[in-house]
Amino acid sequence: MNALSFGLVAGLAFGALAVAPMFKMTFHDKRAAISAAFVERFMIALVIALVALPWPRWAVGLLFGMLLSVPSALITKARVPILVTGTVGGLLVGLIYPFVVR
């Protein structure tokens, strides 16, 4: 599997896993909240797959998972869950990457 394909598949999976618990919650604008969360998590996985840094892939995942979660964390009251989900998810995408992409 190439990096782009992996990024798309990982992004769909990460996005779906991240928004699944949100369907039970109440939001002022639920559609916007779920859409934004999905797009953010999708982009985290896609960036991790496509960025070319000379670091271990797990470190790339950890860094970009955390950095790309900061804007959403700053504008909501749920800072810790957003940062933890993004960071751990990014780390997992980075850890899986070397086993899938050749």
Image: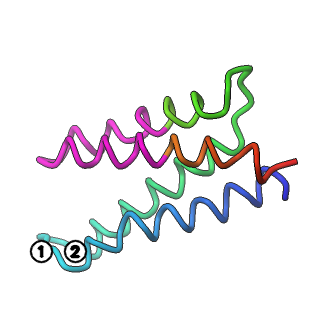
Left or right for 102, reference 30: right
Which percent across, then down, holds residue 70?
A: 33, 36
Give me the residue at 46% from left, 71% from top. 16
Which percent across, then down, holds residue 57?
A: 66, 33
Residue 26's mark? 1
Q: Is residue 83 magenta?
A: yes
Whether pointer 2 and pointer 1 mark residues with C-beta atoms closer than 8 Å, the reply is yes
Badge 1 local density, few (<14 within 10 Å), some, or many (20+)? Answer: few
Q: Which residues are magenta?
A: 65-89
Q: Is residue 26 above or below residue 80?
A: below
From mark 2 to mark 1, how far is it between C-alphas? 7 Å
Question: On the image, numbered disc 2 is attached to which residue?
Answer: 30
Which marked residue is nearer to the observer: mark 2 or mark 1?
Answer: 1
The residue nearer to you, when weighing 78 against 36, is 78
Left or right for 38, reference 3: left
Give me the residue at 31% from left, 41% from top. 83
Give me the residue at 54% from left, 47% from top. 92
Q: Main secondary structure of the magenta part?
A: helix
- Specify the amino acid type for callout 1: Thr
Badge 2 local density, few (<14 within 10 Å), some, or many (20+)? Answer: few
Q: Secondary structure at mark 2?
A: helix
Residue extending farthest to the bottom is: 24
Q: Secondary structure at mark 1?
A: loop
* Quarter of the view holding residue 18: bottom left
